[in-house]
Amino acid sequence: MKKKGTTICCSVCSLLSVLFLALAVAIFVLIQTGFFKEKIDNYVREQLTLEQGHKTYEQWLDPTVPMYKDFYVFNLTNPVQFAGGAKPHFVEFGPYRYRERRIKTVLEHTNGTITYTMERTFHFEQFKNFSDNDTFTTINFPYAAALYSVSGDTLKETALWFLKEFLIKPKPGVVLQVKARDLFWNYTDPLIQKLYEHKSVSGLKSAYINFQFNNSDLDRLHNSTVYSGETNSQLTAQFIQWAGKKSLGIWRSYANMLNGSEGLVFHPFIDQSETIIAFISDVQRSFHLTSSEKVTILGVDGYRFRTILSEFRPNPDYKTPDYTPDGLIYLGVLQVPEAPLWGSKPHFLDADPSLLAAVEGISDPVRNKHDIIADVEPITGSTLNAHQQLQVNFNVTRSSMLFPFDKITPVYFPVFYLDEWATIDEDLKGMLNKLVFVPLTAIDASIWAVFALCCFFSLLTGLVAINRCIRLYQLRERSEEVIPLLPKSDS
């Protein structure tokens, strides 16, 4: 009976050991072939689609991460000397900080796309001692723009001269005094109002000049459409239509195409070697970014992406002439009528050295302070930290006909630069942890735990089986021993 029980135990333990080993091997093979990774990735993609009920959808609709737009103003300190032909000298002031809100209203959500309108507003927040009521001296950009718009047209030049000499009081000069809030958002003066009255000469469609828009009609009154990621996660949040336009219509050729997302979120599972694209509505063009390094923001690892240098090189498709210095992008097409307005990175970072050499008082650019960056968490595609920066410059030229611009030395005159930025906070970090990182860690740990348990039980039952087999062998040896027979007695 004892021998039979040992035999059964040996057989059962051997079978269990083989089964546990087979299961461990199967799990290991599935891990190595990416079976579990594919299932986990699909789970992540599902959680990150812009779908009602998902946290990512709620964040996309109304981001809780604080977003700001900081302005830094270049105050001209030598206006008289500048009008006489000297280099302009500046003192930088700022930041003038505005809290940004982007609230989307969904109009339609179907077939893997979302159509919406957006209220994008800015509210001034006092920072240090800077007030948006501060006054600065800068180039007389309305007059400079008017000179540009009539340049080469003798009739219009004469009309502008007549307006300046006889209809506008006081007569416009090379520079003007302007309050910070008016410079950023809505500026008007007697010249602009008079030019607006004579639209046939000026081409103005508004009595205000706007470098930036607060609660822009483009976002508020016109529909935009993006992919939700439900049918293809690689397209998550990418634009199909912006402000009612599927093609921008202001550039040439491919430059009119809508590419990329708004820059707050990208598709999941971003590789460090790939190029990501962000569409920046303020300048109505897409920017390509490549990863330069790894970063850690609030304990979350990510890749730092920067704009590629060719974005700020002459490109005829973006109406940038070949003779344009490196480091500038044309913004004049965004104004009506077109104005000699150019964008650059702050302090002319990555630009032709002649641009910075033509002005005084502006410090050399610093890469980590003045570059355009997006720090992206690669699994979720969430932006951990971003700085969309742009310096606004006026291409000031000399006009021999129209005093007082007859002695000026031509220069790309920096007016201000802005830094639109946002950084992940503890609340969003907690949301990402709860939504993705903790489940991923738990699932991954569970798979390896099951693998380890299978290995352990395979080893344990194998040892037991070996022990029982040895015991069975010993029992068999004993049973086969020769037992001496008792001698028969004589009857």
Image (spheres, rainbow, N blue to C red):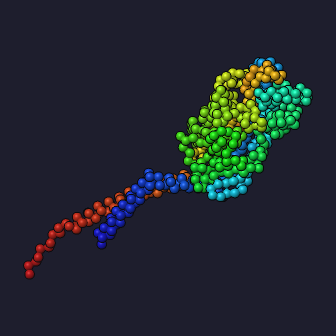
Q: Position of residue 432 (x, y in %)?
A: 62, 50
Figure quadrant of the C terminus: bottom left
* Residue 345 appears in the figure: no
Looking at the picture, tell me which residue is in the foreground, 163 or 121: 163
Residue at the (78%, 31%) spot, across then down? 149
| Side of 367 where 460 appears, left or right | left
Q: How many numbered circles are shown?
A: 0
Specify the farthest residue to the front.
155
Quarter of the figure with residue 253: top right
Residue 328 sits above or below residue 303 on the image: above
Residue 357 lies left or right of residue 123; in this view the side is left
- Quadrant hosting residue 257: top right
Would you identify the image quadrant in which residue 425 lies? top right
On the image, the x and y values in percent for residue 371 come to 65, 33
**Residue 152: % across, % down:** 76, 27
**Is there any visible trace of residue 44 in the rendered image?**
yes
Q: Residue at x 79, y 21 (%)?
A: 400
Relative to the observer, which residue lies in front, 146 or 190? Answer: 146
Left or right, residue 60 beside residue 179: left
Q: Residue furthest left?
A: 490
* Relative height, residue 25 to residue 95 (above, below): below
Q: Quadrant of the N terminus?
A: bottom left
At x 29%, y 69%, the residue is 3
Q: Nearer the viewer, residue 76 or 126?
A: 76
The residue at the far bottom in this view is: 491
Side (left or right) of 193 relative to 275: right
